[in-house]
């Protein structure tokens, strides 16, 4: 098994982690394939970032698609200065290896701090009672946004909200710990088995207007 990263619009692959680096670069998606250019873009300024850092992963190369069929508006929105905008946040280390941090639209900004839900989800998935977890940002009067975690437990397992919050406190910076944990039978998923976070957010929004 070889770790990597790709997307339909830049098929078949963009990044690859060589097997010899797998042990020392756990969680990394690796480096770009030959003839594929990758960069990190500041979502606010649109400028490309140098050196180690975090930004939106953008791609150039012969693997990048020409555009969406008969949808010039969507095609135009998918590119900036010739770069394909993946919508994925990535971290680049000082050796040029990339790690996917999550979706740009899922980024939570709480008290001026950037929080990547995928990091919290990874911590929750490490708890022996947790089968699945999804974290979304919800409005907060004091901090702007805070994190709310939806958790599905393994069959026959038990865990309280406080137990899971304490688990997070021991492994995350204080500002990254979810404000609340909600237990669900299962998370809403698409036909491709991706968690539908928009459905989770919509449910929270409905509660706010009741």
Image (cartoon, helix red, strand yellow):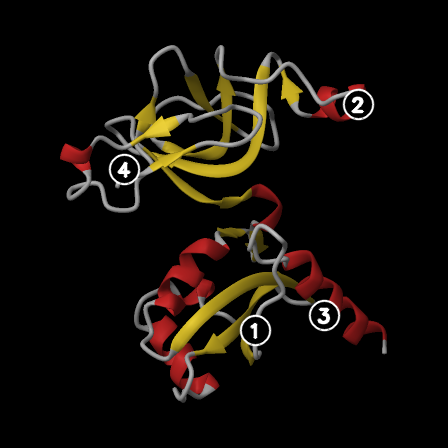
Does dot 4 land on a helix, a strand or a loop? loop
Q: Which is more N-terminal, label 4 or label 2?
A: 4
Query: Is disc 4 in contact with disc 3, using a CB cutoff of under 8 Å?
Result: no
Query: Is disc 3 in contact with disc 1, using a CB cutoff of under 8 Å?
Result: no
Taking the image as shown, residue 125 lies to the left or right of residue 139, namely left
Say which of 83 and 132 sits in front.
132
Please, is residue 180 above or below residue 174 in the view? Answer: below
Measure the C-alpha gap from mark 2 to mark 1: 35 Å
Does dot 1 land on a helix, a strand or a loop? loop
Q: Which residue appears farthest toward the right when viewing the image?
A: 210
Please, is residue 195 above or below residue 21 in the view? Answer: below
Residue 193 is situated, as x and y percent measured from the top left of the image, at 55, 55
Give the residue at mark 4: 2
Query: Is disc 3 in contact with disc 2, using a CB cutoff of under 8 Å?
Result: no
Taking the image as shown, residue 59 lies to the left or right of residue 75, namely left
Give the quadrant of the N terminus.
top left
Measure the C-alpha gap from mark 4 to mark 1: 29 Å
Say which of 85 and 142 sits in front.
85
Does dot 2 land on a helix, a strand or a loop? loop
Residue at 32%, 68% in the rendered image: 126
Residue at 59%, 18% in the rendered image: 65
Give the residue at mark 1: 186
Give the residue at mark 2: 71
Count neighbours of disc 2 (C-alpha within 10 A) and say few if under 14, some if 14 to 19, many if 20 or more: few
Give the quadrant of the C terminus.
bottom right
Taking the image as shown, residue 175 lies to the left or right of residue 66, namely left
Residue 37 is situated, as x and y percent measured from the top left of the image, at 42, 15
Residue at 42%, 41% in the rendered image: 100
Residue 124 is situated, as x and y percent measured from the top left of the image, at 40, 69
Q: Which is more N-terminal, label 3 or label 4?
A: 4
- Say the numbered circle drawn on residue 204: 3
Q: Nearer the viewer, mark 4 or mark 3?
A: 4
């Amino acid at each position: 098994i070889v770790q990597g990263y790709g997307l339909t619009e830049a098929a078949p692959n963009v990044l690859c982690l060589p097997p010899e680096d797998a042990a020392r670069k756990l969680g990394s998606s690796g480096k770009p394939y030959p003839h594929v250019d990758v960069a990190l873009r500041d979502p606010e300024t649109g400028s490309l970032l140098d050196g180690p850092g975090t930004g939106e992963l953008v791609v150039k190369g012969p693997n990048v698609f020409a555009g969406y069929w008969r949808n010039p508006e969507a095609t135009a929105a998918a590119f900036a200065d010739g770069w394909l905008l993946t919508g994925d946040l990535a971290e680049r280390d000082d050796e040029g290896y990339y790690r996917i941090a999550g979706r740009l639209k899922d980024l939570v900004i709480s008290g001026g701090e950037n929080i990547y839900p995928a990091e919290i989800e990874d911590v929750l998935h490490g708890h022996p009672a947790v089968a699945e977890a999804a974290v979304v940002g919800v409005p907060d009067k004091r901090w702007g946004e805070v994190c709310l975690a939806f958790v599905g437990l393994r069959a026959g397992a038990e865990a309280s909200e406080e137990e899971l919050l304490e688990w997070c406190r021991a492994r995350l910076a204080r500002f990254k710990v979810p404000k609340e944990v909600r237990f669900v039978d299962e998370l809403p998923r698409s036909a491709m088995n991706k968690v539908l976070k928009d459905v989770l957010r919509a449910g929270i929004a409905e509660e706010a207007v009741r």
